[in-house]
Amino acid sequence: MSEQKRRKSVTIYDVAKEAGVSPSTVSRAFSRPGRVNAETSELIHSAAAKLGYRAKPVLRPEVGVEKNCLGLVVADITNPVYAHIMRGFQREAADAGYTVLLIDSQEDGRAEYGHIQTILPLVDGLVLSASRLTDSAVNQIVKVVPVVATNRIIAGLPSVVPDSGRGMRRAIEHLASLGHTRLTYLAGPEASWANGVRWRAATEACHELSLHIRRVGPGTPTVQGGVELARKWRENPTTAVIAFNDIMAIGFMKAAQSFGLTLPGDVSVVGIDNSISSVLTTPTLTTVSPQPSLIGARAARALLSQLKHRNAPSAETIVVPMDLIVRESSGTAPHHPPSFDDER
């Protein structure tokens, strides 16, 4: 066999064996370099060079040619709310004759930017959902393709955002009507625009209603993130908690129950998103709904409008109403905050 043919037969499995890593790590090293540490990446590329492996390049359409493909970048595909956003987005895109390319940034701004750079030649436009990129990084992308942001307002871009002020106000009014006077907000990621907006809205509503609210976090918007913040809440417990999202709220509920507490007898919990998970818990979760399917649909329409009117781009901010969905996890405030003595 000639040297040329031998090299053509080399696969990522050969490279993985040579480098002592898994094939999936080799794949990431070439397709998503930001997700592999520098030492491992160097080891993999050295092994590839030794074996003569060459990664297959992504086929790139010619500049100026319509691809009939739109990109949707989400922060965490394991969070059910993004499935709702994608469904609304995909439905509108399909009706207009476009397919959708989905990117999961895994809450990592650097990885998000790297992935976007990879797919830019393949899409006509992008929607960034809860992006962790800086404004300057987003503006670099806008120079290549039209961009629409959701769950975040970026100057100069069309944005689709939920009415967080209304949503948080409804949640806090609900808890106040049940007799709660001291609340805790479980904060999401520090880099999250939505987290900042929700906290400000919560503090303003509590100030107007003469309630006390404190913040614990930031935390990761996952079940484990909710569990970890529940431990911090336990140091100075309140009778009610509002979480950054449903997934964190569910993590908090699991931890509170493991502490021996009852919900909502000892502590009431409110989430945000109205994801499918909110009706699968015991008790079911009271939540604020940002109507994610509608957010996805409106984002798709805004992006399609940008593509149609490239010479007159819009920077409109589209606000989607948020509504409170009352379920079993919120109830009348107990006379005293939860206690954690040895008998419990």
Image (spheres, rainbow, N blue to C red):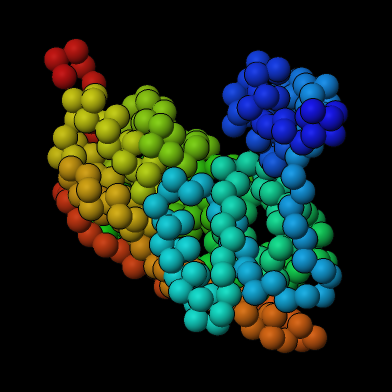
Residues 240 and 2: in front is 2
Residue 207 position, x and y percent, is 43, 56
Residue at x-position 56% and y-position 80%: 97
Residue at x-position 60% and y-position 46%: 105
Horizontal relation, residue 67 to residue 230: left or right: right
Residues 165 and 294: in front is 294
Q: Is residue 249 above or below residue 74?
A: above
Q: Is there any visible trace of residue 122 in the rendered image?
A: yes
Residues 335 and 327: in front is 327
Q: Is there any visible trace of residue 334 in the rendered image?
A: no
Residue 108 position, x and y percent, is 63, 41
Q: Is residue 116 above or below residue 51?
A: below
The tally of labels here is 0
Horizontal relation, residue 191 to residue 43: left or right: left
Horizontal relation, residue 29 to residue 285: left or right: right
Residue at x-position 24% and y-position 24%: 259
Horizontal relation, residue 234 to residue 190: left or right: left
- Furthest residue to the front? 1
Quadrant of the image for the C terminus?
top left
Quarter holding residue 231 = top left
Q: Is residue 115 above or below residue 121?
A: above
Residue 271 position, x and y percent, is 34, 50
Q: Is residue 218 above or below residue 313?
A: above
Residue 91 position, x and y percent, is 46, 74
Residues 148 and 155: in front is 148
Quadrant of the image for the N terminus?
top right
Residue at x-position 80% and y-position 86%: 311
